[in-house]
Image (cartoon, helix red, strand yellow):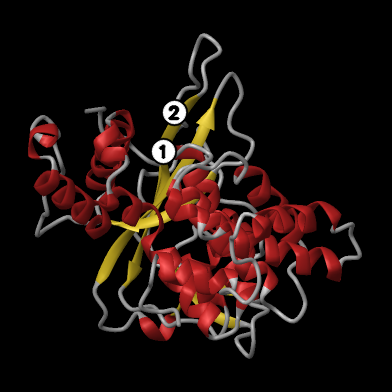
């Protein structure tokens, strides 16, 4: 277990960057202020979403990691889980008209709640979990998810029931009744959570478990499916993109969970009246990934994927001859290539979700 991490306070000026659409809060290793912000920070944010403009938002106390984890040595590339900061928020934050589409994707918008929602609500800590493939240089495309203590606890309990022997030597932070929001406790928990995730990915049976997959994508996938049902694909696509990038860092390129999510992303990009600007990029990637796929479950998605790409190529004025040849070859083998399910329907048949129809 790695030692506890003492964090830094973040200034109001730095927080303003987050609310204005800038990057994540940066570390200030030279800061001499106290380790934890004890007061509530109120910031005006101009939110360009629906009717929610110029509303007052409240950022509660923030903990920040003092330094990033060291890069691997010897030219190796290693998967890295790091919690760079944590926030204390009130429970049941009021969703924005469209901004709630961000879900738990790690964006600054999800850290903000209207001041009216703080009255009488219990507080909780959100940990920003950064997932990276670091080498001699930091991962140029790190991806983050936001998780609460209960997410980690659910993961730990599920794995302990499934593989008790493998969890015997794993120390997990216990619930506490007092001091939940102290800098010391949040630093200790952050270190423990990082070690826990590091351990999971080194053990194949834990890494491939449904409990770990649910931890990585469950909240975002449910929200994305809900948005797709509401025909708000433009908000579902960023969630699916972020989740795909996380799974793609952890699992093999042709893993079932990776390909299934990639096909969900293609379907989300192509079922709108106007295809998503990056629909071709994701469709081309899916076609490349499907070369030499042997998983019979996943092969049921290949014909719908080809049909989707064929229609997309037609919309974009691209040459469709190669796709048509593949479909013709499959038709000659007795495979039904016309009148079958759409890509979205085939995905739902393979992995039904309560939010999708």
Residue drawn at x 35%, y 51% is 213
Position of residue 170 relative to residue 90, above or below, is above
Residue drawn at x 17%, y 55% is 179
Disc 1: which residue: 82
Spatial CA span between label 1 and label 2: 7 Å
Residue drawn at x 60%, y 66% is 336
Residue drawn at x 44%, y 79% is 356
In this view, the residue in front, 111 or 95, is 95
- Is mark 1 in CB contact (under 8 Å) with mark 2? yes
Residue at disc 2, secondary structure: loop
Disc 2: which residue: 69
How many C-alpha atoms fall within 10 Å of the one at disc 1: few (<14), some, or many (≥20)?
A: many
Q: Is residue 108 left or right of residue 169?
A: right
Name the image quarter holding residue 97.
bottom right
Position of residue 107 relative to residue 156, above or below, is below
Q: Position of residue 185 (x, y in %)?
A: 22, 46
In this view, the residue in front, 265 or 92, is 265
Q: Position of residue 83 (x, y in %)?
A: 40, 43
Position of residue 5 relative to residue 324, above or below, is above
How many C-alpha atoms fall within 10 Å of the one at disc 2: few (<14), some, or many (≥20)?
A: few
Q: Where is residue 311 in the image (x, y as percent from the top left)?
A: 77, 69
């Amino acid at each position: 277990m790695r030692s506890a991490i003492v964090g830094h306070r973040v200034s109001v000026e730095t927080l303003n960057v987050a609310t204005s659409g800038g990057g994540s809060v940066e570390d200030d290793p030279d800061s001499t202020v106290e380790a934890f912000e004890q007061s509530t920070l109120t910031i005006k944010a101009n939110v360009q979403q629906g009717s929610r403009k110029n509303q007052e938002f409240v950022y509660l106390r923030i903990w920040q990691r003092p330094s990033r984890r060291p890069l691997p040595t010897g030219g190796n590339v290693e998967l890295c889980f790091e919690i760079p900061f944590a926030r204390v928020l009130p429970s049941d934050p009021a969703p924005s008209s469209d901004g709630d589409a961000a879900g738990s994707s790690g964006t600054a918008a999800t850290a903000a709640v209207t001041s009216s929602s703080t009255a009488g609500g219990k507080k909780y800590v959100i940990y920003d979990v950064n997932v990276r493939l670091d080498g001699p240089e930091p991962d140029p495309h790190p991806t983050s998810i936001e998780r609460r203590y209960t997410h980690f606890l659910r993961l730990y309990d599920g794995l302990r029931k499934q593989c008790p022997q493998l969890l015997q030597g794993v120390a997990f932070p216990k619930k506490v009744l007092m001091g939940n929001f102290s800098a010391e406790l949040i630093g200790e928990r952050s270190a423990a959570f990082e070690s826990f995730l590091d351990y999971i990915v080194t053990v194949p049976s834990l890494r491939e478990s449904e409990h770990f997959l649910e931890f990585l994508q469950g909240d975002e996938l449910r929200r994305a499916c809900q948005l797709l049902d509401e025909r708000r694909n433009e908000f579902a696509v960023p969630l699916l993109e972020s989740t795909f990038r996380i799974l793609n860092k952890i699992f093999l390129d042709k893993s079932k969970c990776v390909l299934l999510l990639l096909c969900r992303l293609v379907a989300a990009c192509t079922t709108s009246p106007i295809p998503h600007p990056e629909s071709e990029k994701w469709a081309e990637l899916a076609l490349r990934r499907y070369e030499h796929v042997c998983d019979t479950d996943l092969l049921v998605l290949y014909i719908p994927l080809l049909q989707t790409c064929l229609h997309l190529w037609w919309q974009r004025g691209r040459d469709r001859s190669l796709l048509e040849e593949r479909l013709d070859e499959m038709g000659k083998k007795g495979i039904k290539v016309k009148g079958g399910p759409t890509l979205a329907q085939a995905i739902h048949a393979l992995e039904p979700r309560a939010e999708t129809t």
